[in-house]
Image (cartoon, rainbow, N blue to C red):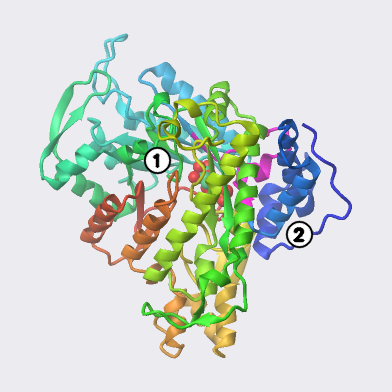
């Protein structure tokens, strides 16, 4: 479809200083000599136009493509909603690959393994990240029929994927990101758990152990469990579940890796089990997918829906500033409108996207998964004056995500009426449960929003702020000092603002030790490290409750955290219904796979 022409009266885009740098460096289309060929207006119109143009083929649509393009443009440039990076980079270009998340199968043969390496390279080139399960590979030293030799096992093949990734830049801008998963009952699980012991090993991978319900029960009962060779189904060995679990906790304490995912739970929510089992997620863990499936994400900036100047309600017993009631201080009607437009946008992205493999196109078009999520959550809590680590924030988080989920599904139903349900709907669990019909097999996902949050100028995903004031390295050695705008406004309101104070905050990041500042201010303006790990986990669980896919969240722990603390967090994640968990102990040796807009 031909995108509508750019109208003359298109308003200009107000970019924050970081967005200027990031967009110029990575998102503007460049000419042969590397100079940008577009500005922010051209970029956002290119995207809005390309995505709205898909509307034309749906005869029952209430929108005309040019009017819809304008709505999409306003949505994005008002920093209310942004699609994932590949859509920003590639919509309306020759490349046209618009999804951030892919999962590829790794079969138990040299041919299948190297097919996966090749397909991953093609996906990385197009800007997507890949997840793999290595669980189908025969274990180390198993016999190889055709050669009479012995197999080298999942971990050695993982190294090949890692090396191949090193050489390929995503969309010509960043190195590829991968997720590698091995089931807890694979005979090579111990080697896998220890894979990142050496610094810098598997640096292009996040690793997660796939835990099963059976294994968790064995840990609880202090029993042994079976390690099974996937290619023969034979039990190879039995291990004490608690011993393996302890090792997992120990390694996570040392380096943050591996994380864990709960495979049975992910499959319990698999909307299309007739198409097979879900065995992996995308690189950052928020998007479980079938083999050869891809998903495009988009995020709503919640802080853009704050309505200033509403009357305040008194402090709750959780503490905090007297604050406005969320009922009035959040523009729920506008949020609803944006959710509906966001779902339409993401569904159109599926049609507009060109995938590097026919198999992927088929799978994506059959299920039409999208992942609408949120960012700017911590900022909204600052604006509202509600401490992140409070029951009130957890309650509001649940309510907020339930709203996004309910309205998102309602929007998907509207699309199903206009365009028909996703083709696999009849064989999906929705049909069995008499729900729907829906246009999309999944609607919601909470992405990390590493770059999107920089462009929109808000806090990332549902994460708390890392620091209230800091200097940021924005590529190529450029540094920017940044103060959280809500914090700065609150300081001015309470008459505490001074240059000296800002310097002190920039050095520390947190204000918790600054006794001279008003207590209620300190209570609201908490940062990641001020927040006790259980609150991180509770917030993740609150959002997971109303998310079809999964939630990207890191549970931050202080350097002094013990192994017991990590064990408690893992166990809580299991009990509270999370689909996985990632911990990061401050100052531990891990270098995270790049999932933020910083670096490179
Ligand atoms: N991703 C990737 N490489 C990166 C960052 C992200 O492949 O360097 C993929 C990955 O699947 C991740 C998803 O994009 O889970 C979403 O990440 P994020 O929300 O941080 O991306 P953004 O759209 O903000 O760039």
Q: For the N terminus, which image quadrant?
A: top right
| Local crowd size for mark 1, using a 10 Å CA cut-off: few (<14), some (14–19), many (≥20) | many
> What is the magenta range?
82-102
Classify residue 105 as left or right of residue 479.
left
| Secondary structure of the residue carrying numbered label 1 | loop
Classify residue 257 as left or right of residue 440.
left
In the picture shown, does residue 24 fall above or below 98?
below
- Residue 56: x percent and y percent? 75, 34
In the picture of the structure, the residue carrying the numbered disc 1 is 202
Q: For the view shown, which residue lies furthest in the front direction?
A: 434
Task: Say which of 250 and 51 sits in front.
Answer: 51
| Secondary structure of the residue carrying numbered label 2 | loop
- As for residue 400 lying within the magenta part, the answer is no
- Residue 326: x percent and y percent? 52, 70
Specify the quadrant of the image occupied by residue 508. bottom left
- Residue 180: x percent and y percent? 39, 37
In the picture shown, does residue 395 fall above or below 567?
below
In the picture of the structure, the residue carrying the numbered disc 2 is 13
Specify the quadrant of the image occupied by residue 482. bottom right
Task: Say which of 107 and 434 sits in front.
Answer: 434
Mark in front: 1 vs 2? 2
Q: For the view shown, which residue lies furthest in the right direction?
A: 8
Tell me which residue sits at (57%, 71%) in the image.
329
Between disc 1 and disc 2, whose residue precedes?
2
How far is the residue under mark 1 from the one under mark 2? 40 Å
Tell me which residue sits at (62%, 67%) in the image.
480
In the picture shown, does residue 54 fall above or below 531?
above
Q: Tell me whether the residue at label 1 lies in contact with that at label 2, contact meaning CB atoms closer than 8 angstroms.
A: no
Classify residue 342 as left or right of residue 240.
right
Task: Say which of 354 and 107 sits in front.
Answer: 354
- Residue 96: x percent and y percent? 68, 34
């Amino acid at each position: 479809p031909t995108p509508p022409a750019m109208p003359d009266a298109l308003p200009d885009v107000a970019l924050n200083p970081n967005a200027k740098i990031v967009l110029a460096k990575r998102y503007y289309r460049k000419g042969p000599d590397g100079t940008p060929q577009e500005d922010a207006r051209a970029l956002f119109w290119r995207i809005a136009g390309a995505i709205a143009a898909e509307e034309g083929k749906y005869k029952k649509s209430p929108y005309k493509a040019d009017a819809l393009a304008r709505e999409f443009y306003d949505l994005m440039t008002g920093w209310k909603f942004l699609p994932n990076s590949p859509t920003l980079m590639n919509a309306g270009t020759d490349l046209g690959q618009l999804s951030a998340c892919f999962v590829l199968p790794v079969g138990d043969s040299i041919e299948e393994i190297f097919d996966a390496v090749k397909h991953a390279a093609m996906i990385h080139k197009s800007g997507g990240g890949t997840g793999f399960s290595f669980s189908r590979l025969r274990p180390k030293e198993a016999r190889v029929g055709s050669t009479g030799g012995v197999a080298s096992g999942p971990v050695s093949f993982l190294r090949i994927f890692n090396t191949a990734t090193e050489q390929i830049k995503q969309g010509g801008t960043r190195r590829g990101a991968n997720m590698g998963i091995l089931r807890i009952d694979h005979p090579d699980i111990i080697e896998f758990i220890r894979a990142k012991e050496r610094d810098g090993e598997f640096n292009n991978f996040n690793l997660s152990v796939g835990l099963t319900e059976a294994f968790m029960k064995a840990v609880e009962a202090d029993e042994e469990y079976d390690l099974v060779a996937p290619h023969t189904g034979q039990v190879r060995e039995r291990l004490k579940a608690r011993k393996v679990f302890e090792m997992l906790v120990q390694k996570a304490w040392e380096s943050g890796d591996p994380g864990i995912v709960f495979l049975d739970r992910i499959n319990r929510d698999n909307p299309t089990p007739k198409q097979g089992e879900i065995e992996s997620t995308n690189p950052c863990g928020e998007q479980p997918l079938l083999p050869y499936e891809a998903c495009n994400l988009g995020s709503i900036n919640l802080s853009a829906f704050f309505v200033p100047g509403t009357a305040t309600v008194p402090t709750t017993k959780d503490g905090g500033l007297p604050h406005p009631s969320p009922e009035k201080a959040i523009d729920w009607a506008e949020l609803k409108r944006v959710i509906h437009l966001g779902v339409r946008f993401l569904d159109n992205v599926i049609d507009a996207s060109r995938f590097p493999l026919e198999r992927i196109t088929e799978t994506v078009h059959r299920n039409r998964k999208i992942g609408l999520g949120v960012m700017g959550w911590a900022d909204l809590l600052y604006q509202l004056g509600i401490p992140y680590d409070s029951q009130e924030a957890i309650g509001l988080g649940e309510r907020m995500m339930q709203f996004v989920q309910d309205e998102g599904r309602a929007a998907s139903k509207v699309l199903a009426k206009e365009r028909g349900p996703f083709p696999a709907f009849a064989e999906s669990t929705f049909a069995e449960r008499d729900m729907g019909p829906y246009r999309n097999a999944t609607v919601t996902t909470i992405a990390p929003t590493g770059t999107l949050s920089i462009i929109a100028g808000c806090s990332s995903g549902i994460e708390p702020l890392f620091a209230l004031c800091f200097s940021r390295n924005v590529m190529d050695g450029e540094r920017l000092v940044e103060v959280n705008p809500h914090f700065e406004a609150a300081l001015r309101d309470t008459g505490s603002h001074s240059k000296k104070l800002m310097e002190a905050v920039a050095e520390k990041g947190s204000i918790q030790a600054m006794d001279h500042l008003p207590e209620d201010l300190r209570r609201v303006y908490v940062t990641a490290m001020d927040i006790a790990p259980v609150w991180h986990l509770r917030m993740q669980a609150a959002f997971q409750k109303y998310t079809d896919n999964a939630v990207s969240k890191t549970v931050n722990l202080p350097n002094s955290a013990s192994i017991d603390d990590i064990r408690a967090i893992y166990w809580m994640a299991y009990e509270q219904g999370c689909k996985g968990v990632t911990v990061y102990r401050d100052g531990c040796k891990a270098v995270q796979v790049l999932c933020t807009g910083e670096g490179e």
